[in-house]
Image (tube, grey):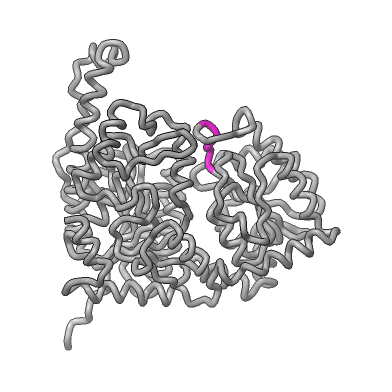
Amino acid sequence: MPDQPRSKRIMLVAQRPSDYVEMKRCAIALSRCGYDMIIVYYISGAPRPDELPVLEDMHRLKEAGEIADAFMFELTARSAFPLPSNFDNAEEQDAAASVPKLIRVSSYRKYAPRFLFRHRHTLIRFPLAIARQIWLPVTFVRTLKAIDATIAHLNLDAIVLPEDVVGLVTPLVVRAGHQHNLPSVIIPYTIANQSEAFQSLRGNGSYQLSRFANAIVGTLFPRWVMRRDGVALVRLPAPHIVGQELTRTAPPDPWMMNSGYADVIAVENEAMRDYYSAAGIPADKMRVVGAVYDDTLASYINAKEAEIAKLRAALGIETARPILVIGGCPDQSTSCPRFDFTDMRAFCDRLAAGVREVAADYEVVVRPHPNYPEMGSMLANHGFLVSMIDTARLVALSDAYIAFGSATIRWAISCGVPTINYDVFGYDYDDFKTVAGVANVSSIDAFEAALIELRRHGDEYLNWKQRSETDAQRWGTLDGCSVERIVALIEEFCAARSGPRGTVGARAGQEQS
């Protein structure tokens, strides 16, 4: 009897809690289609408090058999570790390691004499700064080597990423994958273009072109520089740019997410295809197939009454009032173009005061952002119901949605849910400004005025609901078949492994060689 062919092994990449939420959804869906899914979570050092639940959940998924394996890749140690059952036990983590580790070389600070290190800000600030400029590019080279070793060890067939964005993770993963003739497929969950990258960095001093090292590197590699409204920035600080150039992982457009060398972008819908095209992504790099979360949304929409009853029971809601969902945001208050409040707590206090005006019409449910769960606690203090139930489930079954520049607004659009997009951090993104069902506001007064229109007893809400349904099909593919199309896309690129891959893969190889 001939041996059964093994299941294809796919590595899924995540590097922040918000990545993991959607990559977990993807991993479970593809695992049910017969793939051996391996999640690798990249961390910069010891796991942060908000990352511990992610690692614990990865361990749970592995133990339950929902994924084949899970690893934590520590960038500072340049090693991948299987997840231990106890994340506080570093010895257990080391003992469980099975992926070959490269020799650990800590930063130059470890070898500095204690006296000098203790007084580094006054005695050796300049030498340390010079050392950092040299050390970080070396880190890129060493990390690429370590990622390559991990990929070789895992015996993969393909790599799935949530994005391809400049830095120490996704470009190196894509490059290492190509070195093993593995296709890289981007299954996006968020949205960003060049303008958004610029706006998010313009207040950060490390990215100013006026800095000496940035000015030199920006002259040598001008595609990393952007100038707008009298402000000149580099996309990454100088040593990081040198590291990307040294490893040949610098994308054609460093300012545009997903402009790198991944083989294909599994584009979510027609609106997103137009968005990527306007930002310069080549048409032959995109396939409109839908998104994993589209099938999640469709499963709730197609049985809405029964699902709403289940949701009310899960949340402990006993009334028949419609549901207003507030999607939380990460804390960007100290690094954004504009923030009209003293801190996030003051913002949440004013937000709660405004929402309370429509609380009689709705059951208000707060879903905190994975990267900033503290916002949930702040709003819970005002008596609002806080839940970590899947945002897609909440949005699909809601009657109104409030968000703050979030990519999840696309879910509300595709479900025909009236939405307020409050630009509380002053980024002035254009993403949803032309969508009829989205009220884009940039001040607390405008936000409170939009809330009045959400009151269910007026004609304003009915008109808003009708407008919301006009763009639904362009922003979502809710036929329940998106995962099937994604599987077909992965199979297509896996099938090309044995010989030269298609034009996209070939171009990537030429650009990176």
Q: Residue 439 lies in magenta, yes or no?
A: no
Report which quarter residue 344 is drawn in. Answer: top right
Report which quarter residue 311 is drawn in. Answer: bottom right
Q: Quadrant of the C terminus?
A: bottom left
Q: Where is residue 272 in the image (x, y as percent from the top left)?
A: 49, 63
Q: Residue at x 28, y 29 (%)?
A: 213
The image shows residue 118, relative to residue 39, as above or below, that is: above
The image shows residue 175, relative to residue 352, as above or below, that is: below
Check the image and name the residue furthest to the bottom: 1
Report which quarter residue 443 is drawn in. Answer: top right
Which sits in the foreground, 5 or 299?
A: 299
Instruction: Look at the image and tell me whether residue 88 can be seen.
Output: no
Q: Quadrant of the N terminus?
A: bottom left
Relative side of 19 to 311, left or right? left
Q: Which residue is drawn at 22% across and 59% down?
A: 177
Q: Position of residue 374 (x, y in %)?
A: 56, 39
The image shows residue 170, relative to residue 413, as above or below, that is: above
Q: Position of residue 511 (x, y in %)?
A: 22, 57
Which sits in the foreground, 17 or 507?
A: 507
Magenta: main secondary structure equals: loop
Q: Position of residue 228 (x, y in %)?
A: 46, 39
Instruction: Look at the image and tell me whether residue 62 can be seen.
Output: yes
Check the image and name the residue furthest to the left: 103
Relative side of 192 to 93, left or right? right
Q: What span is colored magenta in the figure? A: 330-334
Q: Which residue is drawn at 60% across and 30% down?
A: 343
